[in-house]
Image (tube, grey):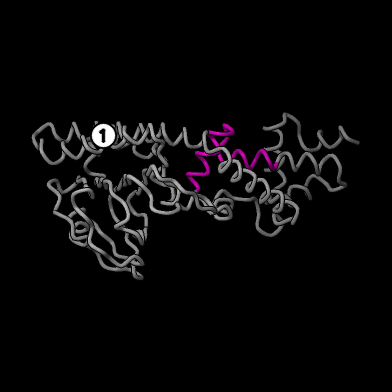
Amino acid sequence: MGASNSGIKHFKSISALMRYLGLPAPQHPLFTVVDYNKTPQLEINSEQKLSIDFYKISFKNRFSGKLKYGQDYYDFEEGGLAFLKSGQIVTPYVDLQSYEGYALYFHPDFIRKFPLGSEIKSYGFFSYNVSEALLLSAKEKPIIEQLFETINTESKENIDQFSQDVLVSQLTLLLNYSKRFYHRQFITRKEVNHEIINSLDQILEQYFQDKTGLEKGFPSVKFISEELRVSQRYLNDLLRALTGNTTQQYIQQQLIEKAKELLSVSSLSVAQIAYQLGFEHPQSFSKLFKSKTHFSPTEFKRSFE
């Protein structure tokens, strides 16, 4: 375990984390699965923040009470998956004893020589907040449960020269199923997700109405994500699934619509509109506007005179 920084316990190795959690030492220093059905976790300080230099995938058979999802809380009894990448800081659940399931830990070095080593960044859910867990359906849960059982058996009982190849293949399969099920979640949880998009539209509209761009500049993805209280990657993946646009593209689309409104009804010059919308240079605004509409702002404005 590394030094504590501002109350954050940093763990460089899986073995050190297992010791801290009161769990058995891993059979492989770079890969381990904890079966909470057989190995209960010791009670630890629920306010202690932890940082790890490896990946973690948590599979919970059920959630106790309500799960925070975006800005609200929702009941979900089927359980789900939560993902954590190297360097993220988390606080353990207060109700550590309230669920059964698995926790899978793997170090970047374990997958480095495999295609997954370079592809791991494409699995955006490792950058989601813990509150943005994958909520499994009744049909999806047995698939994930079986995968964890298979991986656990392989990591504990079949240790030989083929073990790493097999485990990486099984891990890749787990991640691909997770990607599929997350896409399903974006589509099926329409009420929740459309509330997020509606809130996004309201934030942008208020941003433009307040002429905030004059002071703060172009609305950033980071600003929008913080206002919505969702992770940047989750918001980006949600918008791509529902609208076909990234967060940046969606913001630009809304900005262009606002620009069209100002150009058509206001007496402001193109430069004044550019500054009001948050552009530091009117040329940047003109370039973006023309790329999206095939008209320059001046040409568009003249069409309404």
User: Looking at the figure, which quarter contains the C terminus?
Assistant: top right
Can you tell which quarter of the image residue 169 is in? top left
| Numbered range of the magenta stretch | 232-255
Q: Is 146 within the magenta?
A: no
Q: Nearer the viewer, residue 178 or 3?
A: 178
**Amino acid beneath label 1:** Gln
Can you tell which quarter of the image residue 117 is in? top left
Q: Position of residue 133 (x, y in %)?
A: 42, 46
Relative vertical location of residue 253 with respect to residue 225 in this rendering, above or below: above
User: Looking at the figure, which quarter contains the N terminus?
Assistant: bottom left
Q: Which residue is mark 1?
A: 146
Q: Nearer the viewer, residue 37 or 202?
A: 37
* Residue 155 falls left or right of residue 176: left
Q: Position of residue 216 (x, y in %)?
A: 65, 58
Q: Position of residue 107 (x, y in %)?
A: 24, 46
Q: Main secondary structure of the magenta part?
A: helix
